[in-house]
Image (cartoon, grey):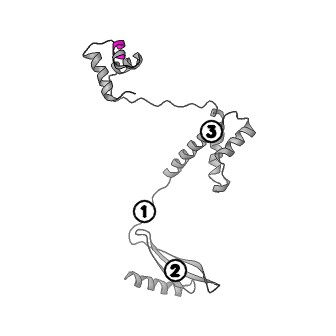
């Protein structure tokens, strides 16, 4: 592709100077087809579309690979197909004659497309101010070579991502109310 000043120079030679396409090509040092393309161009904002790439080797196998990748999304990460494993399965089970690099490029492209599709499905959770979530949790700590278990009451505020934690001896109503009282005092009131 020629730079903009060269494109305008070709148009100037054609329209103002009245040069032929072959004269323009000779003066600018380009092929006559290129000179004709820019001399005859009327819409300078027109963008040239990308050619859609065809894959004659992968074509019949694309749907199968997509199915494997979709099934893999349900499996734990360590049990999923790698690009190399997909190539091996295609070669051994389906007599695939293409190269490993072709399969790896296709798998990489499809995985990134699937990741984009998955990222679009998430919605942001909106939490109103003043709303709290309260729950008990259990933690185990090692102290003096003993494993101690503690119950904690966690009060979190999703709107501000603030949280307060208070240890309790058990998970019952009495401990809950005492822990809530202590958390409110720590917050500075209700």
Work out which quarter of the rendered image holds the C terminus and state it.
bottom left
Q: What separation in Å lies between label 1 and label 3 (alpha carbons)?
A: 44 Å
**Looking at this view, is 25 or 139 the one in front?**
25
Q: What separation in Å lies between label 2 and label 3 (alpha carbons)?
A: 54 Å
Q: What separation in Å lies between label 2 and label 1 (alpha carbons)?
A: 24 Å
Q: Residue at x 32, y 25 (%)?
A: 6
Which dot marks residue 153? Answer: 2
- State the SS at label 2: strand
- Of badges 2 and 3, the one in the foreground is 3
- Dot 3: within a 10 Å radius of its alpha carbon, few (fewer than 14), some, or many (20 or more) residues? few
Work out which quarter of the rendered image holds the N terminus and state it.
top left
Q: Quadrant of residue 103?
A: top right
Which dot marks residue 126? Answer: 1
Q: State whether the magenta stretch is mostly helix, strand or loop.
A: helix
- Dot 2: within a 10 Å radius of its alpha carbon, few (fewer than 14), some, or many (20 or more) residues? many
- Of badges 2 and 1, the one in the foreground is 2
């Amino acid at each position: 592709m020629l730079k903009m000043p060269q494109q305008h120079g070709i148009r100037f030679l054609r329209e103002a100077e009245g040069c032929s396409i072959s004269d323009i090509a000779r003066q600018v040092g380009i092929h006559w087809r290129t000179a004709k393309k820019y001399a005859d161009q009327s819409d300078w904002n027109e963008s040239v579309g990308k050619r859609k790439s065809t894959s004659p080797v992968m074509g019949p196998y694309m749907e199968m690979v997509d199915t494997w990748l979709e099934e893999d999304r349900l499996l734990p990460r360590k049990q999923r197909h790698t690009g190399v494993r997909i190539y091996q399965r295609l070669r051994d089970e389906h007599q695939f004659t293409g190269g490993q690099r072709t399969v790896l490029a296709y798998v990489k492209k499809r995985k990134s497309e699937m990741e984009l599709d998955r990222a679009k499905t998430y919605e942001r959770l909106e939490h109103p101010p003043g709303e709290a979530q309260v729950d008990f949790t259990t933690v185990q700590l090692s102290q003096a070579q003993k494993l101690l278990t503690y119950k904690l009451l966690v009060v979190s505020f999703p709107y501000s991502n603030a949280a307060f934690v208070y240890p309790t001896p058990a998970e019952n109503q009495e401990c809950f109310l005492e822990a809530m009282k202590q958390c409110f005092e720590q917050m500075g009131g209700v």
